[in-house]
Image (tube, rainbow, N blue to C red):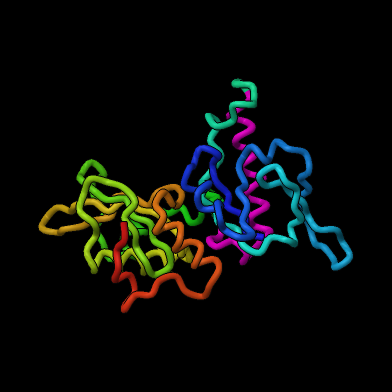
Amino acid sequence: MILVLASQRDPGAAALVAGWAGARLLTPADLSVPGWVLVTGPTGPDDPPGRGVADGVPFRTDEVTRVVSLLGRVDAAELSWIAAEHRSYVAAEMTAVLGHWLATLGGRCVVAPSHVSLAGPSLPTAAWADAAGLEVGDTDRPGAAVTVVGTDVFVVAGDGPPPGPAARRGLVAMAAAHGAPLLSALVVTGGGGRREALGAVLPAPVVRTAAVRDAVRRLVDGPAVGRTTGAGERVAS
């Protein structure tokens, strides 16, 4: 079973799961449904597995083969079924529980969570840019939001030009250097004669286009993502 962890307000996540055999959507709302059992400490082969709920349906942790996280943290504003005065606390507790749970899954997570984000590494923009061979850019400049999936780079939003081949290769190298084969970033027009710069790495991957969703499914289901002639040499929109 493949689990896609995302906000219930993320239409791209719902579209990703739709028609994907063996995939289920796991949202913060599922954490309010009885049926969760988290395993802590060492376990043996005879110990019962942990349990959870995804899309309202119970599952066992040992049934999970892969997890795709499209959620950096649980947003208190999303918890409309929780009393307003308790939402911030509950959101923080849900984020902590999910972080612990993802950590127990180890390599089954497509991108390992960090202590800051459920979606992967959370580094200063300068550290990401250094790995990409790009300068840090001003997010007020025109830019394009892109999603890196393995060796492919897809434009998903923005008012700026798509990144060129060198920037695409840099973004793929950046993602690989930090063990994050799925991430989204903002590439902006650079200053000082440089055409492109890294504005930011977004808190969670954006899968709002069909091309990105197809690539994510290939990343999870198969050994390779793209069929390019070189790493990152194709940009799709």
Q: Which residue is found at the position 76% from the left and 45% from the top?
A: 36
Q: Quadrant of the N terminus?
A: bottom right
The extreme bottom residue here reads: 229
Q: Which residue is found at the position 47% from the left and 74% from the top?
A: 224
Can I make out residue 18 in this image? yes
Name which quarter of the figure residue 230 lies in: bottom left
Nearest the viewer among 211 and 188 is 211
Left or right, 156 with respect to 10, comes to left
Left or right, 111 with respect to 163, comes to right
The extreme front residue here reads: 19
**Magenta residues, dominant SS class:** helix
Left or right, 181 with respect to 76, comes to left
Left or right, 75 with respect to 160, comes to right
Q: Residue 56, percent across and down?
A: 70, 42
Q: Is residue 58 above or below residue 33?
A: below
Q: Residue 218, percent across and down?
A: 49, 67
Q: How many marks?
A: 0
Q: Residue 200, percent across and down?
A: 33, 50
Can I make out residue 124 in this image? no
Q: Which residue is found at the position 34% from the left and 59% from the top?
A: 154
Bounds of the magenta span?
86-112
Nearest the viewer among 203 and 21 is 21
Q: Quadrant of the C terminus?
A: bottom left
Q: Residue 136, percent across and down?
A: 26, 54
The extreme right residue here reads: 46
Q: Is residue 143 above or below residue 234?
A: above
> Residue 109 in magenta?
yes
Q: Which residue is found at the position 27% from the left and 51% from the top?
A: 144
Q: Is residue 192 above or below residue 107?
A: above
